[in-house]
Image: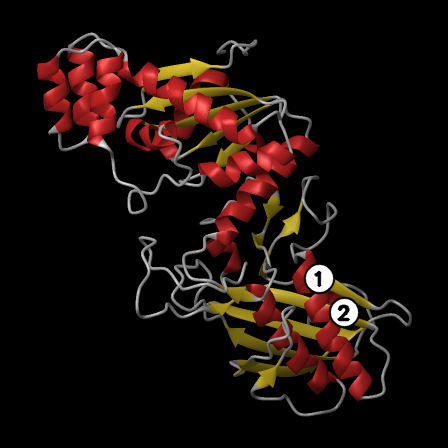
């Protein structure tokens, strides 16, 4: 996750005199657990606290929540994987502290178990309980690999390599990473859609969790695009929520790998598609949110940007509404209320907003070869407005 050198933000995005507390990624916790386990494997004590070096040079220390030693028998990974059967192993666990970020893995126990690998094998990785396995192409890991991302792998390899060097031993080690209850926690993530099965991903690029940066969510959107492209899909849909996603599936019958859980991050989605295009893109979401996109706003969260009733009233003017209706719209309480006024007057406001949103999205995509469709839904998930690229578009099933 990206470290932010500027002032911290509250959830609503406003600067706050009290900075939000940063935390640590699962990758950092796994690195600390692996370093402690490696030190113990080479005959030392479990360092407590254990210190690791992050990609940016920071050196945080972590208290150990769990320590274990054992032999390869009794069902340990050494026996199950056929690696140095009967050999010793050591394991340690760290409780993840995500700071003030609403992270799904906050408070989870991240474990690492380390044992000796075959001579010359270097550092290799295994998925322990609660860590998933990659099953689809398009991710930065090969199919069949444990879902331990590249930066955490480098961090872990460096940490256990330092432990081996300090003991005068080769760094031919197997590192198994697990997360307690990770398979249940993964159901609250996008892992299943990305083809990561059996548990969580071990994530992190800087090792630090920045509160409310939502970097993990945006990274999941990007990986979703990668998986869709690797599968050769020509049509993807980026939706703001469950109802809009169901509306797209009902219309087009898209596969799960074609669905991007965009949330409020339309800007991040479009910018990634600009660099990694897919031929056809459906954006689907509620009238209020896409009213913001139509204004050129790329963060659709209600706490970032409020509904602009003057703007909606002006759009009614575009459609020929009389002054009384326009005045009522300026004084409305909700965007849905304005939409109801337009519908009662026979004015296609949702279509108009959809077209303006489509143009705003196309501007962000620039010259990328992506045809854009925008579908606007009401609170029941019904499609009430739409706009399409001037070029061809697939017909609903």
Q: CA distance from mark 2 to mark 1?
A: 7 Å
Tell me: residue 173, above or below residue 36.
above
In this view, the residue in front, 207 or 137, is 207
The residue lying at 30 percent from left, 18 percent from top is 350
Q: Position of residue 233 (x, y in %)?
A: 64, 25
**Are discs 2 and 1 less than 8 Å apart at CB?**
yes
Tell me: residue 191, above or below residue 332.
below
Can residue 73 be seen at all in this image of the molecule?
no
14 relative to 28 in the view: left or right: left
Q: Position of residue 5 (x, y in %)?
A: 50, 65
The residue lying at 69 percent from left, 26 percent from top is 232
Q: Residues within 10 Å of mark 2 (few under 14, many from 20)?
A: many
The residue identified by callout 1 is 126
Q: Position of residue 24 (x, y in %)?
A: 51, 69
The residue lying at 66 percent from left, 58 percent from top is 148
Quarter in which the N terminus is drawn: bottom right
Q: Secondary structure at mark 2?
A: strand
Q: Residues within 10 Å of mark 1 (few under 14, many from 20)?
A: many
The residue identified by callout 2 is 174
In the image, which disc is placed on residue 388? Answer: none
């Amino acid at each position: 996750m990206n470290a932010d050198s500027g002032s911290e933000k509250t959830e609503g995005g406003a600067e706050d005199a009290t900075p939000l507390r940063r935390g640590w990624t699962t990758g950092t916790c796994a690195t600390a657990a692996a370093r402690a386990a490696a030190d113990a494997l080479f005959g030392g004590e479990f360092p407590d606290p254990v210190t690791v070096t992050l990609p940016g040079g920071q050196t945080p220390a972590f208290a150990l929540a769990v320590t274990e030693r054992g032999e390869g028998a009794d069902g340990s990974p050494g026996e199950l994987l056929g690696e140095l059967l009967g050999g010793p192993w050591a394991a340690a666990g760290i409780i993840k502290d995500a700071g003030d970020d609403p992270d799904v893995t906050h408070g989870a126990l991240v474990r690492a178990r380390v044992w000796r690998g075959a001579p010359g094998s270097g550092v290799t990785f295994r998925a322990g309980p609660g860590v998933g396995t990659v099953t689809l192409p398009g991710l930065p890991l090969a199919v069949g690999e444990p879902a331990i991302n590249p930066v955490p792998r480098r961090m872990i390899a460096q940490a256990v390599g330092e432990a081996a060097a300090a003991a005068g031993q080769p760094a031919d080690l197997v590192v198994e990473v697990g997360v307690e209850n990770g398979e249940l926690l993964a159901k609250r993530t996008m892992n299943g859609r990305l083809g990561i099965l059996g548990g969580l991903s071990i994530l992190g690029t800087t090792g630090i969790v920045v509160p409310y940066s939502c970097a993990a969510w945006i990274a999941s959107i990007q990986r979703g695009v990668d998986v869709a492209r690797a599968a050769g899909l020509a049509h993807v849909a980026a939706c703001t929520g469950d109802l809009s996603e169901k509306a797209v599936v009902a219309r087009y019958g898209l596969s799960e790998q074609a669905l991007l859980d965009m949330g409020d991050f339309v800007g991040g989605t479009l910018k990634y598609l600009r660099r990694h295009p897919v031929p056809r893109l459906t954006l689907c979401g509620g009238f209020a949110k896409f009213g913001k996109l139509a204004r050129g706003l790329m963060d659709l969260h209600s706490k970032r940007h409020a509904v602009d009733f003057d703007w909606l009233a002006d759009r009614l003017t575009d459609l020929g509404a009389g002054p009384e209706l326009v005045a009522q719209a300026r004084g409305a309480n909700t965007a849905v209320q304005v939409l109801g006024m337009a519908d009662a007057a026979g004015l296609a406001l949702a279509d108009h907003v959809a077209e303006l949103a489509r143009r705003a999205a196309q501007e962000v995509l620039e010259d990328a070869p992506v045809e854009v469709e925008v579908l606007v839904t009401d609170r029941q998930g019904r499609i009430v407005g739409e706009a399409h690229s001037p070029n061809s578009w697939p017909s609903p099933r």
